């Protein structure tokens, strides 16, 4: 428990204290956000706001994770792998953000280059997860035996790649309003921290050997998100950029894979799923029927154009994110209560 408090508390304070330093450095070097001209008009005023705040978040996560191990908690390959994956995706986002700043445009890496980089890191994660971290290859909802389906090395690797690429891009799509992504992700990581600690306390049911280390990663991510949110809340003084959104999304996907709750990710990160679906629906509808379902996609921009103030959209989406995360935790705990009745040991 002490290690969990160290990870979360240290990550939170590092994010709170280092983000303003990063803001000043970015402002001094004129590294600011470039806003899409075809986006909502009310966002044009945000042009020039310092971006790449994900650097502070990643730094806070790494520091929080490392400091937590001063409490005699051993490092586990799975935990190190999740942190490394988040940093790698953050590096992809950093290159994307840097290109935007350098060329003074709202577009960074081209789609193929960005996707290729994401695939390379995801494949590396999948290989290392099985060969080095020895993560279970069963298709799992709340525990490794919940479906009874063993995907095998290849099948699990394909699923892992899809989840990492999908989750990273889902958070990236959601990062469109001040504090929306960071606030929403905080709920998800907090729930994953609870799940990881519960798996650690009940190893005989879940058989997740690195559960405590994964809980440390999750609580460090929650603390970093919360600390960054202090400066990222509306009106934002800094944006996380793709550096932060890709890192957070990949970390959430990697944690669920390592904890053997891959299918539960759809519930815990329900808001990100809804936002992503809004983009898919919009694109398919326009290309097939020549009509738009929403005023603008992703979904949060639709409500902005419908007349909702930005803060109203943000807070209501936070509520939805919290409800989805709570539902995921409820499903996990309900399954735990059913284990003795089913005779699972």
Image (cartoon, grey):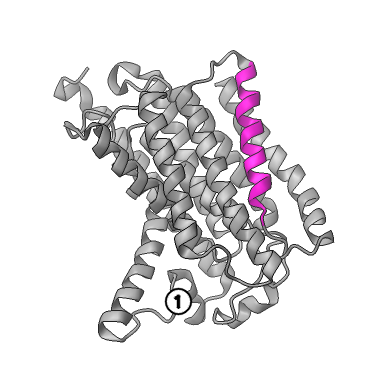
Residue lying at 34% horizontally and 18% vertically, measured from the top left: 203
For this rendering, which residue is in front, 162 or 51? 162
Residue lying at 75% horizontally and 62% vertically, measured from the top left: 31
* 183 on left or right of 323: right
For this rendering, which residue is in front, 257 or 7? 257
Residue lying at 67% horizontally and 39% vertically, measured from the top left: 59
Residue sitting farthest toward the right? 28
Q: Locate residue 114, reporting x and y percent.
A: 49, 57
Residue lying at 65% horizontally and 78% vertically, measured from the top left: 44
Per the rendered image, the range of residues in magenta is: 52-70
Vertical relation: 232 (above or below) 104: above
Sort mark 1 into few (<14), some (14-19) or many (20+) by Cα contacts within 10 Å: some
* 18 on left or right of 178: right
- The kind of secondary structure element at disc 1 is helix
Vertical relation: 338 (above or below) 46: above
Task: State the count of labels.
Answer: 1
Vertical relation: 26 (above or below) 331: below
Image quadrant where one finds the N terminus? top right
The residue indicated by pointer 1 is 302
Query: Is residue 227 visible in the rendered structure shown here?
Result: no
* 198 on left or right of 158: right
Magenta-drawn stretch contains 55: yes
For this rendering, which residue is in front, 172 or 343? 172
* 250 on left or right of 96: left
Instruction: State the image quarter where residue 29 is shown.
Output: bottom right
Vertical relation: 224 (above or below) 298: above
């Amino acid at each position: 428990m002490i290690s969990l408090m160290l990870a979360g508390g240290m990550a939170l304070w590092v994010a709170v204290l280092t983000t303003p330093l990063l803001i000043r450095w970015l402002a001094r070097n004129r590294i600011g956000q470039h806003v899409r001209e075809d986006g909502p008009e009310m966002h044009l005023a945000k042009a020039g706001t310092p971006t790449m705040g994900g650097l502070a978040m990643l730094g806070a996560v790494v520091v929080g994770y490392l400091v937590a191990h001063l409490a005699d908690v051993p490092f586990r390959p799975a935990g190190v792998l999740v942190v490394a994956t988040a940093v790698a995706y953050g590096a992809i986002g950093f290159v994307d953000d840097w290109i935007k700043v350098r060329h003074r445009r709202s577009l960074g890496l081209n789609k193929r280059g960005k996707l290729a980089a994401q695939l390379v890191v995801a494949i590396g994660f999948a290989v290392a997860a099985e060969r080095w971290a020895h993560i279970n290859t069963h298709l799992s909802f709340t525990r490794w035996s919940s479906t009874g389906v063993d995907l095998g090395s290849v099948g699990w690797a394909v699923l892992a790649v899809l989840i990492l690429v999908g989750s990273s891009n889902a958070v990236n799509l959601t990062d469109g309003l001040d504090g929306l992504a960071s606030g929403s992700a905080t709920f998800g990581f907090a729930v994953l921290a609870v799940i990881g600690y519960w798996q650690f306390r009940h190893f005989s049911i879940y058989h997740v050997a690195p559960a405590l280390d994964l809980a440390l990663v999750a609580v460090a991510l929650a603390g970093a998100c919360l600390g960054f949110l202090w400066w990222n809340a509306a009106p934002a003084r800094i944006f996380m950029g793709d550096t932060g959104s890709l890192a957070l999304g990949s970390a959430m996907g990697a944690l669920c894979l390592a904890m053997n709750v891959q299918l539960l990710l759809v519930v815990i990160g329900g808001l990100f799923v809804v936002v992503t679906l809004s983009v898919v629906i919009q694109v398919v509808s326009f290309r097939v029927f020549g009509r738009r379902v929403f005023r603008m996609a992703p979904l949060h921009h639709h409500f902005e154009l419908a007349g909702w103030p930005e803060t109203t959209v943000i807070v209501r989406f936070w509520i939805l994110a919290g409800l989805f995360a709570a539902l995921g935790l409820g499903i996990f705990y309900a399954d735990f209560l059913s284990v003795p009745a089913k005779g699972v040991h």
